[in-house]
Amino acid sequence: MIEPEHRLSLVRQAQLLNLSRASLYYRAQPTSDEDLALMRRMDELHLEHPFAGARMLRDLLRQDGFSVGRKHVATLMRTMGIEALYRKANTSKRHPEHRIYPYLLRGVTIERPNQVWAMDLTYLPMARGFIYLVVVLDWATRRILAWRLSNSMSADAPVEALEEAIAKYGTPEIMNTDQGSQFTSGEFIGVLERHHIAISMDGKGCWRDNVFVERLWKTIKYEHVYLHAYATVSEAKSKLAAYIDFYNSRRPHTALDRRTPDAAYFNQRPLAAAA
């Protein structure tokens, strides 16, 4: 965006773009080893106690021997993209370009492939650093239809994963996501609207509205991610690809009568999964 070699001075470019001059000279600092250890433990605690906010996480971390304050925990939670999951009062105004859509699945029986897809993004720890994983999940069959890794929580990876899933498997009747900025962005919503897919969004901070994706994160992390310390993004990508193939094609699922997600998705036998 800022071009150091441009004939306009850096100061003038910043003015035209409405950017702070100080931001021109900022260089992101790598996350410290101490913070990476904190974030890894916070991720585990969040999976076990999704209702825990910054204060409770601080206290749980202190029980584990970490010396950390509430404000720092809150900062790391924002970096990781996690929050305490509970219903909050709707007291704030959202950006007018980021429309929030109603939750469409309450009381709906979801019983066939491509009836409802869900998407979400989660934090993954690495040996040195972290990345984010986004998946497209078929709700009825629990099959992972597409996924992407990203070093940010922008809309790029969700859009790419969604477009891949549509290209391979057609379109769902409904797409359900949370209210994260990557899923309320114009780019992401535009793909759904072009394909005439009904848009459903969880209540703010309510894990029950997207419970199957929350369960998927726990499965992936405890069965695979926490057992590997990825050294590079390419290693993470190759090992996750192998695990997701196992998850889809070989791992039996209790909710599917011990069938695999592949068998349930491609067989298209009636299922019984209520939202």
Image (cartoon, rainbow, N blue to C red):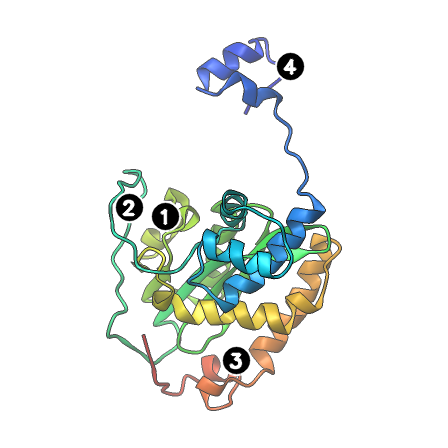
For marks 4 and 3, the one nearer the N-term is 4
- Circle 2 SS class: loop
For marks 4 and 2, the one nearer the N-term is 4
- Pointer 2 and pointer 1: residues touching (CB < 8 Å)? yes
Residue 254 % position (x, y): 48, 87
- In the displayed structure, would residue 132 be above or below residue 245? above
Work out whether residue 54 or residue 190 is closer to the camera in this orientation and state it: 54
Which marked residue is nearer to the observer: mark 2 or mark 3?
2
Using the numbered discs, state the Cα–Cα distance from disc 2 to disc 1 in whole angstroms: 7 Å
Where, by quadrant of the figure, is residue 187 drawn?
top left
Using the numbered discs, state the Cα–Cα distance from disc 4 to disc 2 in whole angstroms: 38 Å
Q: Name the amino acid, label 1.
A: Thr
Q: Residue 184 got which mark?
A: 1
For marks 2 and 1, the one nearer the N-term is 2
Work out whether residue 223 or residue 199 is closer to the camera in this orientation and state it: 223
Crowding near the residue tagged with mark 4, few <14, some 14–19, many ≥20 C-alpha atoms within 10 Å: few
Q: Name the amino acid, label 2.
A: Arg
- In the displayed structure, would residue 196 be above or below residue 275? above
- Circle 1 SS class: helix
Q: Name the amino acid, label 3.
A: Asp
- In the displayed structure, would residue 259 be above or below residue 144? below
Q: Residue at the spot x=58%, y=20% of the render?
A: 24
Work out whether residue 187 or residue 218 is closer to the camera in this orientation and state it: 218
Left/right placement of residue 6 relative to residue 205 reads right
Q: Which residue is mark 3?
A: 262
Crowding near the residue tagged with mark 2, few <14, some 14–19, many ≥20 C-alpha atoms within 10 Å: few
For marks 2 and 3, the one nearer the N-term is 2
Q: Residue 99 got which mark?
A: 2
- In the displayed structure, would residue 163 be above or below residue 31? below
Using the numbered discs, state the Cα–Cα distance from disc 1 to disc 3 in whole angstroms: 30 Å
